[in-house]
Amino acid sequence: MSHLDILLPFGLPPAELATDLLRECKTPALAALLAYARSPQSRTFDVFSRYLPHEAWLMQQFLGIDLAKADTSPPVAANALRQFDLPSDPGIWFILTPVHIHIARDHLVLTDVRQLALEEHESTALFNAARPLFEETGKTLLYGDATTWFVRADDWHDLQTSSPDAACGHNIDIWMPKGTNELGWRKLQNEVQMLWHTHSVNAEREERGAKPVNSLWLWAGSPMQSPMPHAPYREVLNLHGWMRAFGQSDTRQAHARSADEVLAAQPASTLVLLDTLLAPALSNDWGRWLQQMQALETAWFAPILAALKSGQIKQLKLILTHSSRSTEFTLQPSSLRKFWVKPSLARLLP
């Protein structure tokens, strides 16, 4: 394998907890990889950005888009539509994500979408209930899967929106769509919320102790003529949900549970997304974050270090992020010859 990139969202611990977390983090292979890497390259992001650093990295890599210049969520709706093989008219399309919004002490907070565990039959029923409201306003609503719907809304073309993960856990007022016709969206959103309040799907969910689906999140707006992604890799692994929008006919997309599966395939260049730290970080569950980091050490970091030592991997890049920073570490087999370097996780500190 000539080139392997590993994208690890929230592989960087938060600054205020970093020292304590790294003290408990027993990952010697990762410590070696980070210590032997050449001087890392870092980029900082505004804490109020409408996207997360790993989302920005994917956009730059596949579409050549710098989100910082637009301050909006990744504009991938059109490409996501193509991945679902849905009929799509010219115009401006957005992704709609069914969500749960809960009331904090004095504001509303978006809950991590993963916690909903929304079933297809539930999502379909809610979609069918909401569709007439969209049609009444001249909006086309399409169903992709349980967590990915689409709406065509040409008059919302200038809305600045936020990705669900960027807004998760925060006061949603800051991350709500902003633009000329934001009130039109809020009115429609409110109508859907009232309709779903008494829907049988939510009644059944609450009976079994699940969170109700009480709102929709609008994001990812893009025109149908938006650029198709280019293929910087021969193989792209573990992209799911909206990230499948980066698929190309000459790029193989699949899932891999361990580095051994990737190394056995021997593609020329591969990108692997390892996002098991994302959900624990968004919910501030740092005990689970440590557990997942240990699992990654066994399944990924240790085999990758061994493959780099043997020359099976010619170049390795680790892209680690948290909510406002990304850092890239690059290594070649020759990097491991630094016998004077002591493995350490210190480079994860802010």
Image (tube, rainbow, N blue to C red):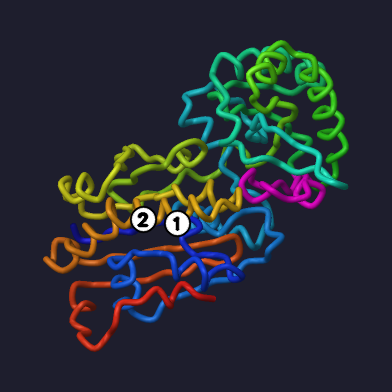
Q: Nearer the viewer, residue 13 or 241?
A: 13
Q: Nearer the viewer, residue 112 or 91?
A: 112
Query: Percent from the top left, x then y, of residue 268?
Result: 21, 54
Name which residue type carries label 1.
Answer: Leu
* CB-based contact (under 8 Å), mark 1 and mark 2: yes
Picture residue at 52% right of the left edge, 35% below the top: 80
Q: Which mark is residue 294?
A: 2
Magenta highlight on residue 254: no
Task: Evaluate whether residue 221 shows in this view.
Answer: no
Query: Percent from the top left, x then y, of residue 22?
Result: 45, 69
Residue 95 to residue 175: above or below: above
Q: Nearer the viewer, residue 331 or 259?
A: 259
Name which residue type carries label 2.
Answer: Gln
Residue 347 to residue 175: above or below: below
User: What is the magenta range?
Assistant: 158-177
**Alpha carbons under labels 1 and 2: distance apart:** 6 Å
Q: Secondary structure at mark 1?
A: helix
Q: Secondary structure at mark 2?
A: helix
Quarter of the figure that contains the N terminus: bottom left
Report which residue position mark 1 lands on: 290
Dot 2 alpha-carbon crowd within 10 angstroms: few under 14, some 14 to 19, many 20 or more: some
Q: Is residue 244 left or right of residue 186?
A: left
Picture residue at 53% right of the left edge, 70% below the top: 18
Predominant SS along the magenta part = loop
Quarter of the figure that contains the C terminus: bottom right
Picture residue at 77% right of the left edge, 19% below the top: 196
Magenta highlight on residue 165: yes
